[in-house]
Amino acid sequence: MACSGLHKAETLNIFPTSFVHLNIASLHDTACKVAKMAIEHGPIDTPPRAPSPVHRFGTLAVHAGSPHDLVTGAVIEPISLSTTYAQSAVGHPVGQYEYVRSSNPNRHNFESCIAALEHAKYALAFSSGSATTATILQSLASGSHVVSTADVYGGTHRYFTQVAHAHGVRVTFTGSIVADVAKLIEDDTKLIWIETPSNPTLSLVDIRAVTDIAHRSGIMVVVDNTFLSPYIQNPLDHGADIVVHSVTKYINGHSDVLMGVAAFNSDSMFERLKFLQNAIGAVPSAFDCWLAHRGAKTLHLRAREASKNGLMVAQALEESPHVIAVNYPGLASNKDRKIALKQHRDGMGGGMLSFRIKGGKEAAENFCKTTQIFTLAESLGGVESLVELPASMTHMGIPRDQREAAGVFDDLVRISCGVEDGTDLVGDVRQALEKVMVLPKITNGLAQRNGNGNGHA
Ligand SMILES: Cc1ncc(COP(=O)(O)O)c(C=O)c1O
C-alpha cells in the first residue's frame, strides 16, 4: 500500500530542511506501520476533528473586512480618499473600484464586516440611518402599502408619514403588531417595518411570529436593530429579510460618525438596493467608513459593558419610590422578558432604558439637568452615558395622542448607558432622583434654585 500523501509535508518551510527530512522519513515509516496494523486489527480510533473555521463575534468584529495592506503590510487599512480609480483601458479599471459613489475600499471593508456580524450575505452602507430607511422605502413600487410598529424612531415616523406618500407609499401603524399584522395586510402590502426594542419604550416584538405571517403572503420584514446592535440580536436568524442600523449609535459607538447600514441575504435585493445606493447617492465618506469600522472592532466589548450597566441602572430605578415604571427588557419583571430570552444573546437587555418619573414633565426635565455623569443630549449607543426627554426632544414631531398611545408621556426619561463604571452610573441616577424629588420638599423648593445641574440644559 502506497503512503504517498505524507511526502507533501516535505514542502513545508517552517522548519530547517534537514529537520523536516529526518522527521518526514520517520513519520512515513510510522504511518505505514499504523496503516498495516489497521488492516490487520480492525479500525483505529478516529482522531478528534479540527475545530470548525466558523469564528465567533469578537473574532469577526476584529478581522472581518480587515485585510492587511498588500503593498505595505499595514495591519490597519489605510483611508482611501481618492474619488476616482485608474483604468488600464476604457471600461477596464485597474482594480475593483471605479468611482467613489459606487464603491470605495473603506466602505467595502466596513460592509463586509457588518455582513459577517449580522449573519448576512450582503451589507450596504448609507450616509445615515435615515438614508437607509429612505432608500429601502424608495425600493417599493408606487402604490405599495407598509405596516409599521407605532413607536418607531421619530425620524422614521416622520419619513413614513410626511415623505413616503410623495412616491406613492402608504404606511399603517399599529401598537401591537403580532396581534394585528394579519388583519392589516392588504393586497398591496409589500413590507413590514419593526423596531425591536422600540424607541423609546423598549417594547419587544417577536420577530419570528411576524415573519411567519408576513412570509405566507410574500411580504418582506425589515427590523431596525439599532437599539441592540448585532452583538445582542441578529434579526435575520429569526426570519427577518433585512436588518437596518443607525451606525451612528452602537456600531460606531463613539458619537462622532453619522452613518447607516442595511444587511440581508437576497441576491435580487442586493441588485436593487445597490442600484439605489449608487443612483440616489446617499453614501458615507471613506473617512466615516474607516471610523465606523474601527468602532465596530470593539462592539462586543462596549455592548456587553453597556448592557451590564443598563441592568444595574434599571434595577436601581425599579427599587426607587420616585419612579412610576421602568422599561427595560433585561428585568425579570419586564412584560417582554420571554422574547428577550428568545431573541437576545444570553437574554441581555442592552444599554437602553426608559422610565416614568413621579412629578410629571417638570420632574423629568429637572432629572435630566441634575445628572452629573449622564449628559443631557439626543442620540445613544456611545461610550458616554446620555439622558433625554423623548416627548420634548427626539419624539416631539409625533402628535401627542399617538405619542401617548405608544407610552411616550411627558414624564418619560430615556437613558443610554455608556461604558463608564456601572456603580458610578447608579450613584448618579440615585443622587439626581434625590435632588429632584426629595430636596425640594425638605427645603421648600429653594434647593433647585441653587443649581445642582450639569449645565447642559
Ligand atoms: C432606532 C433608530 N433608527 C434610525 C435612526 C436614524 O438614524 P440616523 O440618525 O443615523 O439617521 C435613529 C436615530 O436616532 C434611531 O434611533
Image (spheres, rainbow, N blue to C red):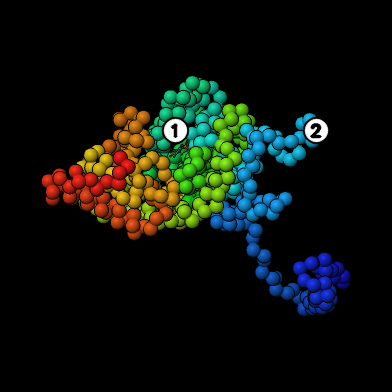
Tally of numbered tags: 2
Using the image, determine if residue 78 lies above or below residue 49. Answer: above
User: Ligand 1 closer than 8 Å to the CB at disc 1?
Assistant: yes
* Mark 1 or 2, closer to the camera: 2
Q: Which mark is residue 236?
A: none
Say whether residue 361 is left or right of residue 190.
Answer: left
Q: Quadrant of ligand 1?
A: top left
- Is 350 on the left-hand or right-hand side of 325? right
Check disc 1 and give the amino acid type. Thr
At 32% from the left and 35% from the top, the residue drawn is 391
Residue 364 position, x and y percent, is 26, 42
Numbered label attached to residue 89: 2
Mark 1 or mark 2, earlier in chain = 2
Residue positioned 65% across, 35% down in the render:
83
* Residue at image coords 66%, 51%: 67
Q: Quadrant of residue 365?
A: top left
User: Residue 187's x, y, as percent?
Assistant: 51, 26
Image position, residue 358 (x, y; %): 22, 44
Is residue 276 shown to the viewer in this render?
no
User: Where's the C terminus, which quadrant?
Assistant: top left
Residue 156 is tagged as 1
Dividing the image into 4 quarters, which one contains the N terminus? bottom right
Which picture quadrant has residue 455? Answer: top left
Furthest toward the right, the residue is 2
Task: Return the residue nearer the eye: 445 or 321.
Answer: 445
| Figure quadrant of residue 23 | bottom right
